[in-house]
């Protein structure tokens, strides 16, 4: 087995541990982005969630990119590698000259040569995008794309788990509040 394949298995295991270690969505997505950059030896990784109401991609986690690049402007879902939100993997070997890249000048200033964009889905519903950036021109292999899709699926699971936890926490707090109101009501003799 090649060294690269072994590091892929290790990364997948590390991401699984991250997903299982916390229900804090920001923390989990940040750790996924960091692990991907380290293990794949790429420039950067960003996780975007799709705001359907605004039809924009919102940065939820990033690692390896400057604050200036992250603040370059809103990503229009129809103009920023749009096929990813249709469920397709997009390989952009030349980010500066590809019309699917919404901010090519910013990519050039940031030193981004290539981009891999993969959909993130939960229960067959696309909710965001995982993007990997390289500083040198790169054509991602089919195996690399499949592996990164697996990581994207893990990110989807993490997002779903965190959202369910947040909903349960809110429901639990409402139930406790209502219970206290009932006890307060009963203790004042209004039974």
Image: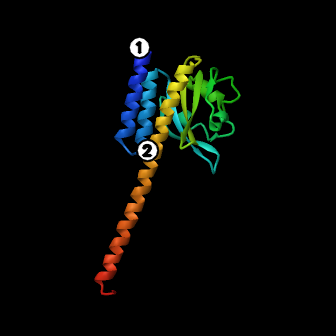
Q: Residue furthest left?
A: 187
The reply to whether dot 1 and dot 2 touch (C-beta < 8 Å) is no
Residue 11 visible within the image: yes
Does residue 95 appear to the left or right of 150 in the view shown?
Answer: right
Closest to the observer, 18 or 66: 18
Q: Is 169 drawn above or below residue 70 in the view shown?
A: below
Q: Is 108 drawn above or below residue 80 in the view shown?
A: above
Give the Cα separation between the discs numbered 1 and 2.
31 Å
Q: What is the crowding at mark 2: few (fewer than 14 residues within 10 Å), some, or many (at least 20)? A: many
In percent of the image, x 50 and y 25: which residue is there?
147
Q: What is the crowding at mark 1: few (fewer than 14 residues within 10 Å), some, or many (at least 20)? A: few
Q: Is 170 drawn above or below residue 23 in the view shown?
A: below
Closest to the observer, 80 or 119: 119
For the N terminus, give its image quadrant: top left
For the C terminus, give its image quadrant: bottom left
x%, y% of residue 36? Answer: 45, 27
x%, y% of residue 49? Answer: 55, 42
x%, y% of residue 99? Answer: 71, 28
Res. 178 image quadrant: bottom left
Q: Nearer the viewer, mark 1 or mark 2?
A: 1
Residue 66 visible within the image: no
Secondary structure of the residue carrying tag 1 is helix
Res. 107 image quadrant: top right
- Which residue is tagged 1? 3
Q: Is 52 drawn above or below residue 83 in the view shown?
A: below
Secondary structure of the residue carrying tag 2 is helix
- Which residue is tagged 2? 25
Res. 111 image quadrant: top right
Q: Residue furthest top?
A: 2
Of callouts 1 and 2, the N-terminal one = 1
x%, y% of residue 117? Answer: 58, 30
């Amino acid at each position: 087995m090649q060294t690269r394949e072994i590091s892929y298995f290790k990364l997948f295991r590390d991401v699984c541990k991250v997903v299982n270690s916390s229900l804090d969505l920001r923390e989990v997505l940040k750790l996924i982005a960091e692990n991907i950059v380290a293990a794949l030896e790429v420039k950067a990784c960003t996780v975007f969630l799709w705001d359907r109401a605004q039809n924009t991609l919102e940065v939820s986690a990033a690692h390896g990119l400057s604050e200036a690049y992250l603040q370059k402007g809103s990503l229009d879902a129809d103009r920023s590698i749009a096929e990813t939100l249709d469920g397709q993997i997009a390989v952009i070997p030349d980010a500066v000259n590809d019309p699917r890249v919404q901010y090519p000048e910013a990519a050039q200033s940031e030193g981004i040569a290539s981009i891999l964009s993969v959909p993130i889905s939960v229960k067959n519903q696309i909710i965001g995008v995982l993007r990997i950036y390289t500083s040198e021109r790169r054509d991602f292999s089919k195996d690399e794309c499949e592996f990164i899709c697996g990581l994207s699926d893990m990110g989807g699971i993490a997002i779903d788990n965190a959202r369910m936890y947040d909903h349960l926490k809110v429901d639990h707090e409402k139930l406790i509040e209502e219970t206290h109101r009932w006890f307060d009501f009963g203790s004042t003799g209004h039974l």
